[in-house]
Structure formats: C-alpha cells, structure tokens
Image (cartoon, rainbow, N blue to C red):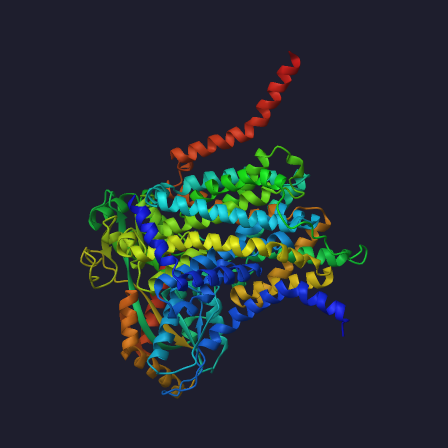
Amino acid sequence: MLSTNDERWVTVRVSPLAAALTALAAVLLVPPLLSSGDSDSTGVRGLRVLVPNSPGGGYDITARTAAKSIEDSGLSSGIEVFNLPGAGGTVGLGRLVNERGNDKLIMSMGLGVVGSVYTNKSPSSLADTTPIAKLIEEPDIVVVAKGSPYTDLAGLITAWKANPGAVPVGGGSSPGGPDHLAPMLMAKAVGLAPRDVNYVPFDGGGELLASVLGGKVAFGVSGIGEYRDQIQAGELRVLAVTSGKRIPGVDAPTLQESGVDVDFTNWRGIVAPPGITDTARDRLVKLLTDLHGSGAWQEALRRNGWTDAFETGPAFGRFLAAENARVADVLRELGLA
Amino acid sequence: MESFDLLMSGFGTALTPTHLMLAAIGVLLGTFIGVLPGIGPAMAVALLLPVTYGLEPTGAFIMFAGIYYGGMFGGSTTSILLNTPGESAAVVAAIEGNPMARKGRGSQALAAAAIGHFAGGLIGTTLLVLLAPTVASLAVGIGAPDYFAIMVLAFIAVTSVLGTSRVRGFAALLIGLVIGLVGLDEMTGQQRLTFGSLQLADGIDVVIVAVGLFAVGESLWVALHLRRRPAEPIPVGRAWLGRDDLRRSWKPWLRGPLIGFPFGALPAGGAEIPTFLSYAVEKRLAKDKSEFGHGAIEGVAGPEATASASAAGTLVSMLTLGLPTTAVAAVMLAAFQQYGIQPGPLLFEREPTLVWGLIASLFVGTVLLLVLNLPLAPVWAKLLKIPRPYLYAGILFFAAVGAYAVSGQVADLLVLFVIGVIGLAMRRYGLPVLPAVLGVILGPAAEQQMRRALQLSDGSLTGLVNTPFSIVVYAVVALVLLWPVVNTLRKRRAARV
C-alpha cells in the first residue's frame, strides 16, 4: 500500500484522468445499457445488427431506425446495433461471412456493397450470405442548376454524346457506388462507352450539391435525399429520375419515358451469415415482415422520405444475383472487375 | 434588423433552464470526450446520437452544438499538455502549446486556447448571423481550381514548420505524403499501397497518424531515455495569463476567426488547413520569431481561435445549403433528417425556432466553454505532475483505446503502433513530425482537387487557373516566394549605394 501522503497525492493528481476514464466508460457503456431488455414475442432475442459503414451513414440510419421500430412495436428486444466500417462495407461483409451459422447476427447493407466487393477485390461476396429482406429503395435523380443550358434530358444527352469529355458528370459515390453506376448505365443505353464518361466523384451527395449549384459539373447524379429542399426552392432542375416510376412531388419524367432504357434505384436491405438453419432464416424473415407491417416502421419510412420496397427470402436472393450481374458487367468494362 | 429580433427570440429558446442544462452537459461531455485521443467531436456526436432520441429536436441540437465546441476544445487540451492531438484540427496547437507546457506554462497555453475558442466562437457565430446567406452563395462559387490554389499556398506555408534543417523537414513531409497515398484511389477505384489488405483500403485516418507520430512516438522516445535522465515531473508555473501574454495574444485571437470562418463555410474547407495557415501567419507577423518552436503563445492563440470560427462557418453551409463540410456536420445532418427536418435554403423560414435557438445556443455554448474551462486550465495542467512512467503509460493506453474506438478493429492498433515506431525513428534521426502530419492532411486533398479540376476542364491545364479566385491566390503565392529574393536584391543595391 501507498503511504497516506502518497495516496492523497495520487488521488488529487489523477482526478482529471479518472474523469476522462469515467467519460469513456459512459460513452462505451451507456448505449448498450439503454438498449437492454428481456421480453420478446418472435423467438429472436439479443439480435446484433452489423453496420458496415460509420455512424450517421445510410446503412447506419436504416439499421438504427429498424431496430428502434422493432423494439417500439414489441417485436423483439435487446437489439444491439454496432458499426464495423471499412472498404465500402466489405470489411463488415468479411466479418459476417466468417460468422457462419450465427443466427443472432444480421447486417444492414445496400447496392454500394455490391460494387465495393469488386473495387476492393474483397475475398467474400454477397453470394456467400443468406438474403433476408430488401427494405427500402431510393431513386437517383439527374439534376442540373437552374441556370444550366440543359432544360431537358434530350438536350443533355445530345451534348453528352457529341463530346463526353466536355460534359463532366458528378456523383456522390466513388467508382462502383450507386451514383457512379447510374450514369454509366445511362451511357451504355445511349451508346456511349462507359470508359469515355468523364465521371467526377465527390465525397457524398452534399459535396456534390455545391458543385451542381455552382455549375462546376455539367450535371449531377445522386440520391434525392439531400436535394429535396433545393428542388423545392427552385435552385435545382431535375431532368429525370432513374427509377421505373416517377417520384411523387418531383416534376420530372423517368429515364425510360425520356427514351433512355435504364431502370435503376439504390436500395438497402438485410442479409445474414451463411450456413444458418432454414428455421433460423424463416424466423428472421418473419421478424422483418412483422417490422414491415408495423406502424412505427411505416411512420419512419414517411419521416425519412424512403420508398418502401419490401421483398424477402428467395425473391430478394434472385434480386441480389441480378444486381450483382449488372454491376459486374459495368465495372468489367471499366477495368474494375 | 429582422434577424436581430429572431436571434433575441432564439435566446429565449436557448436560455430556458432545460436547454441551458443540455448545453452545459454537451460542453462538458464534448470536452471530456475530445480529450481522448482518436475520439473527436464527430465520433462524440455520433455516439451520443441515440441518447438524444428522447429529446425534442431543439434540445438535441443545442446539446450537439455544445458537444461540438466542447470537443474541439478538449482536443486541444491533450494536444497542448501531452503532445497528443485529440483530433486533426488540434494538431497545430501542439507545435507551440506543448513546448509551453514543458516550460511550466501549461495553464497559460490552455487559457490562451480557451479564450481563443471563446473569441473564435463568438466572432464566428456573429459572422454566421450576419453573413450566412451571402457566404453560402459565395461558397458555392468556389470550385476545384480554387481549392487547389489554396492547397499550393498551404504547401508553401509548410516551409515555416520545417524546422532547422530543410532536408529533414522535406523528408518528413514526404513520409507524410506517402502515408497519405495509402488506400483506394477516389477517382479510379484502383488500390494504392494497400498490399491487398481490406483494412487499408480506406486509407489511414489522419487522427491515427497524428496520435501515432506524436503520442506513441513520444512515449517510446521518453521510455528510451528515462533511465538516463532524472524522471522529474514538469514544473507547473503560475496559473494565469500575464500582461505580456495578453499583449501578445489579443491580435491572434481576433485574426484567427477571420481565417477560420470562410474556410469552415467552404464545401471542402474543414478546420485543418486554416488552423495551419493561421499558425504560418502568426509566425510571419510576430515581432520576435525566435520564440516560435519553443513555446510562442501567439502560435496557440491564433490557431485555436481559427478552429472554433471554422466550426461556426461549417454551420453556415449546413443550415443554408444542407451541405455538411465536416464529419460532425455530416452526423448532425443525419440527425436533422432523423427528426424529419431537411436543412436547406428553406430551413430558416420553415423552422425559425429551431435554427435561431441553435444559433443562440452557440453563443451560450461559447460562454459556457470559457466559464467552465478557464478555471479548469490549472487543474488540467496539473496532469503533468504525474510521474512520467505513469503519465506516458496513460497516454499509450488512451492512444490505443482511441485508435481502437474509431472503428473497433485490431488492424488500426497495428497501424497505430507501426506509425508510432516510425515516429520514434524520426525523433532518433532528428526529423520533425509535424510536416509528416501536414503531408497526410494536405497530400490527398491537393491531389483530389487538382485531378478534379483537370477532369472538369477535360484535361486542359488552363482548368487550374480559370477562375479569378485561383489567380489571386497564385499571385499571393508568387509574392510570398519572390519577397525574399526582392528583399535581398534591394539590400544589395542599398549596400552598393
């Protein structure tokens, strides 16, 4: 033991350090404590949700919103959401695939992960996972500033085909991501080689927004989320939406209506590790089906402006395979796959 | 004076006991979390996001604003006392702050930092109130060529921190530039220096590099020398700023925000480059340059005021354009959307209570920060009284916890310690570590903006100088470079006559 004198000395001097430790403990321990509970109704308890990007990102918000809706509706309890970001989601994917047979773990993911598997040369792919459900989708928009010379998609496409290098397109994702794939698919549909497209990647839709508003890029392709307000204020003009259907509240035709045969939406969903039993899989599918039917989730969809795109099990599996083929096709032409 | 009335009603919102308490909790939490190396304000806001779900939006955002300012100040605390930047904007504070702390002037450095944050926050927020719409529309006009010109200017300014030997300084800068290359190339998606590792695909976080080079390198270095040198604790001197300190600090406190605010408002501005430019400016303007590098208080006061003002600038583009320019703003934007609020040009009309309450709480947060931290400065400074073996063990512990907390991966710990060993080697061979950290910050940013500018001009070199702003910046660069030459010529002519 320390002498009394020393002891006093230590307590006094170490207090800021101890305070910092306490703060750290509070940060690390409080969220799990807040989300612990006991009762359940579907037999799924203590589920952990892996988010393969950082807090505040798209998969994170989807996962946390879904977890909260599940708990609020009393469908299950003790759900823990944790982040394992890295390499466009493939670090998290690798972890999920390694947890073979673990039926207490699911991962929130989306179209971005499909492309990242190729650009990051990830050893695990989505084909290794057990598809559970597709939850939501968000169409991309083709957008220009209000002062842009392009007033409709036809005019833009004509200029683009004449000199693709002089018509830079900005997107909020790095190569392989949704905002990169959409213009590449558009280029293919109008007879331009993806390699000739002058794609300028920005760090998210927000940074791109400034360049579209400032007329730095000829046009932008991005999710509608960050742009709604600017569109409403008349600062931006939407030339087309990339989905097969028009978006309510946005006065713009679809690509297909404008003669460009592309139907493209960004989507997010849930997958589980490989090798889980059929019973376990059905239990997770049921949990998410119940979630989809809950009022809390429908309210969350409305609040976040998400489009409902619920699809489960085998249908979601076929969808994943088709998306994978389409992405691989584009990236191969660019030398990325 | 419509905005003045709205601001006053905003104070009405912010000064309710509940909101005042939330702001105070935010500032305190932010400070404590910012103190941990590796966990910056962004991480703090993100981690505390679930805690605020139960609050109404105004309360939640008032708390976030407190966390943001508190986190920025907390980051500088460790930077100054322990040479361990808690986040990237606090790196510059270590250059002069840490030598001050070693000389027993830790409380003065912290006080200069606290008042700097106060001045920066106050001036920055005032500019936010007065100029938000104007600045936002100007910021949109700034593009890749302009950013690249600013980066060139920043690279020129690096020479002011190279240390005594230019060769060693440039060697250190190159080490930083190489570390900055690691990861997936943003433009083409090709892998660079990742050696097939997925963990390296995102590149190496600036915070991990800074903590590795500064904290881990320093701890190892001290450990190697402890046996030979007596392990005396560092003296803790007088607690308050003297008249001389104030005389030297007040101008930097006022100059810093003018540099920080516009950078914060820029879509790709951030806080790292302005803090560093502010340091270069203070060094150039100081009457007695000899003290720089050995604990000049101007070098703490200026950059710290810059950092806070840039935080205020960040909110300009987030509130008026819905455009997050820093990681914290991105998390706050996500939180806005969580509440079903879409920041953008219509936000001021649609949610006046929320926006003006938030802005008023920034003023309140700034004042709270000063009131809470000025008295705490001597207490924090006493941290240095811990005998070195315990102190450095603690630093290593927190550095490791911080690096691990960023994304919960063992790989990050390995990277941290490898960089720490590089930091040790750099100290052994007399290479300054600061240029390396600047290389990691500036290198990738400059590369990205240059390539983006060239892409937008379809490969034409004129794309780098096709804006009035970039031409002005290059003119400044030319002036800075040519000034010593002109000066020498003039002196020579004077000598001849």
User: Can you say whether A217 is above or below A58 in the image?
Assistant: above
User: Can you say whether B149 is above or below B331 in the image?
Assistant: above
Q: Which image quadrant for residue B386?
A: bottom right
Left or right: residue B330 versus residue B226 is: left
Q: Can residue A329 be seen in this view?
A: no
Q: Can residue B118 be seen in this view?
A: yes
State the image coordinates of residue B380 (x, y, percent, origin top left). Answer: 62, 57
At a point 64% along the width and 56% down the height, the residue shown is: B215
Left or right: residue B240 versus residue A292 is: right
State the image coordinates of residue A124 (x, y, percent, origin top left). Answer: 47, 71
Is A307 or A243 nearer to us in this picture? Answer: A307
Is A40 or A237 nearer to us in this picture? Answer: A40
Q: On the rendered image, what quadrant is the N terminus of chain A found in?
A: bottom right
At a point 51% along the width and 37% down the height, the residue shown is: B153
Q: How many labels does the image show?
A: 0
State the image coordinates of residue B83 (x, y, percent, origin top left). Answer: 64, 53
Q: On the rendered image, what quadrant is the C terminus of chain A found in?
A: bottom left
At a point 24% along the width and 51% down the height, the residue shown is: A233
Left or right: residue B385 versus residue B38 is: right
Is B250 or B137 nearer to us in this picture? Answer: B250
Is A158 or A49 nearer to us in this picture? Answer: A49
Q: Which image quadrant for residue A112?
A: bottom left
State the image coordinates of residue A256 (x, y, percent, origin top left). Answer: 20, 59
